[in-house]
Each structure stands twice: as C-alpha cells, then as structure tokens.
Amino acid sequence: LEFRRVLFRSVRIEDNQMAVVLIGDDEQTQIDLPVSLLPDGASDGDHLRITITLDQNAREAMQDRIRKLQEELLNRGKS
C-alpha cells in the first residue's frame, strides 16, 4: 500500500505548538501534528503536500533482527 501526494487541505495552528491539519475536499478528517514537523514558514491556511510510503527495506531488516533474537533465545535454552 502506498500513498503519494496526500493533500492536506489546510492548517490551523493552535498555541504555537500543535497544527490542526484538515484532510480531503470536505475537510472532515483531522490530524493533529506538532508544529515542529511542519515545513519552515508554514502558517494558518497553508496547504501541504505530504508523501507517505512503506519502507520495505526497514521492515525486512527488523524482521531479520527479530528472527536473530528469537534464535538467540532458543539457543540459550539449549545450553
């Protein structure tokens, strides 16, 4: 599953700490993000474009790490 070019319709910043991001044409879905994650200069009413993708390499690396840890635990019990 891959999302590309998700358009965040508008941004409302509250207390200079959290950004309320409204998504979609109807702006009915809301995501709250720390302002520190917004691009420099982003302000109320701005429209953002964000890409979300799966990182298959990171997933495989984590699965390998977990598999190795499981093997280590199983081998400890055999000693």
Image (cartoon, grey):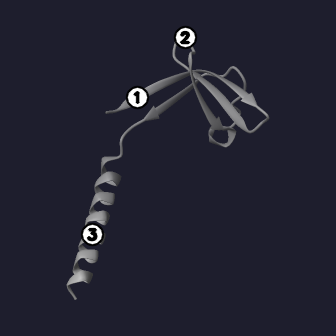
Badge 2 vs badge 3, beta-carbon distance below 8 Å = no
| Quarter occupied by residue 28 | top right
User: Where, quadrant-wise, is the C terminus in this rendering?
Assistant: bottom left
- The image quadrant that residue 61 belongs to is bottom left
Label 3: element kind: helix
Which residue position is annotated with label 1?
Answer: 4
Decide: few, some or many residues near mark 2? Use Cα within 10 Å; few <14, some 14-19, many ≥20. Answer: few
**Mark 3 = which residue?**
70
Of the pair 45 and 31, the residue shown nearer to us: 31
Q: The disc labelled 1 sits on which kind of residue?
A: Arg
Q: Kindly report the distance in space between the C-alpha atoms of the residues bearing marks 1 and 3.
A: 35 Å
- Name the residue located 50 percent from the left edge and 31 percent from the top edge: 50
On the image, the x and y values in percent for residue 69 come to 30, 71
Q: Amino acid at mark 3?
A: Gln
Which residue was labeled with disc 2? Answer: 26
Against 18, residue 78 (above or below) is below
Q: How many numbered tags mark residues here?
A: 3
Q: Nearer the viewer, mark 1 or mark 2?
A: 2
Q: Residue furthest top?
A: 26
Question: Given the current orientation, which residue lies at the most extreme front position?
Answer: 77
